[in-house]
Image (cartoon, grey):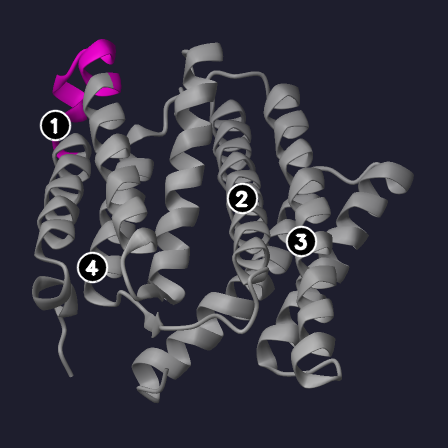
Amino acid sequence: MNLMPALTTNPPAALLSAVAALSYAFLAWAHPRMTPAQTRGVLASAWLLHLIVLAMALLDTPARFGFAPALSITAWLVLTVYLIESRMYPQLKARWTLAVLGTLAVLLALLFPGSEYHALPSNWMPLHWALGIASYGLIAAAVVHAWLMQRAEKAMRQGTTSETSMPLLTLERLTFRFVAAGFVLLSATLLVGGWFSELINERWVWNHKTLFSVLAWLIMGVLLWGRWRLGWRGRVAVRTLYLGAGFLLLGYAGSRFVLEVVLQRA
C-alpha cells in the first residue's frame, strides 16, 4: 500500500499540504508566545494554504475524493467559522485545539487522498457532495461550540478561566443555530441522494452509509424538537448532539474508511 500517493500523483499539492500542516502545527506549538495579531496571521495563512490544497485536489484530473478529503474539508469549514466568529467575539479562544485539528486533517488527506473518479454517474453528483460536506461542516461547528460550552460551564463551576469568556447563552444560541442549519442541509442531502439512487439504481439503496445518515438525521430532528418543545439544554442537548454527530461521521467517513483503508477497495 502506497502511504504517500500524492507525492507521485500531484507533487505540488503534496508540498503545499506539508507546508499547511507545518503552519498549523507551528501555531499549536507557538501560540502561547504569540500576540493575538500574530496568531490570527499564522492561522489565516494556514487556512489559505489549506484552501489551495483542497482546490487543487478537487480540480485535479481525475478527481479524487474519500473519507480523508471529506474530513479535511469539514475541518476547513470549522476553521472558517472560527475565523469569522473570532472577529465578532475576540474573547473566543480555541486556537490550539483548532490548529491541531487542521494539522491532522491536512496530513490525513495527504496520506489517504481517496478514490479516483474518472466519470461521475450523474452531473448532479457534485451537488450531493457539496450539500453533504456543508452539513458535515455545520454539525462539526455545532459540536465545537457545544464542547466550548461544556468547558465554560466547568470553568464557571470551578471559578477558573476557560478558553472562552463568551456568555453561555451566546454559545448555546450559536450551537443550536448551527444544528438547525446543518439539519436543513442534511435533509437536502438525503433527498438528493435518494433521488440519485432512484435515478441510477431505480430504487432506494439501503446500506451502512444510508442507515447511519438517516439515524443522524432523526437524532438531530429529535434534538431540535426537544429544544423547541421541551427546552432541552445542557448535558441532555450536548449528549444528543454528540450522538447524532457520531452517526453522521460513521455515515460517510466511517464507511469510506472501512472501504479504503481496512478492505482497500475503492
Neighbor class of circle 1 (other Cα within 10 Å; few <14, some 14-19, many 20+) is few
Q: Is residue 46 above or below residue 263?
A: above
State the SS at label 4: helix
How far apart are labels 1 and 3 at the CA level?
37 Å
Count of marks overlaid on the render: 4
- Please identify the quarter of the rendering in which residue 40 is found: top left
- Which comes sooner in the sequence, label 2 or label 3? 2
Q: Quadrant of the N terminus?
A: bottom left
Q: Earlier in the sequence, mark 1 or mark 4?
A: 1
Residue 115 in the image: x percent, y percent? 33, 73
The residue indicated by pointer 4 is 110
What distance separates the C-alpha of mark 4 from that of mark 3? Answer: 27 Å
**Mark 4 is on which residue type?**
Leu
- Residue 28 is left or right of residue 207, and the answer is left
The residue wearing badge 1 is 30
Between the C-alphas of marks 1 and 4, the distance is 24 Å
Residue stretch rendered in magenta on the structure: 29-40
Tell me the distance, in whole angstroms, between the alpha carbons under discs 2 and 3: 15 Å
Residues 20 and 128: in front is: 128
The image shows residue 176, relative to residue 3, as above or below, that is above
Q: Residue at x 42, y 27 (%)?
A: 82
Q: Is residue 198 or residue 85 the one in the foreground?
A: 198
- Is label 1 in a helix, a strand or a loop? helix
- Res 93 visible: yes
Q: CA distance from mark 4 to mark 2?
A: 25 Å
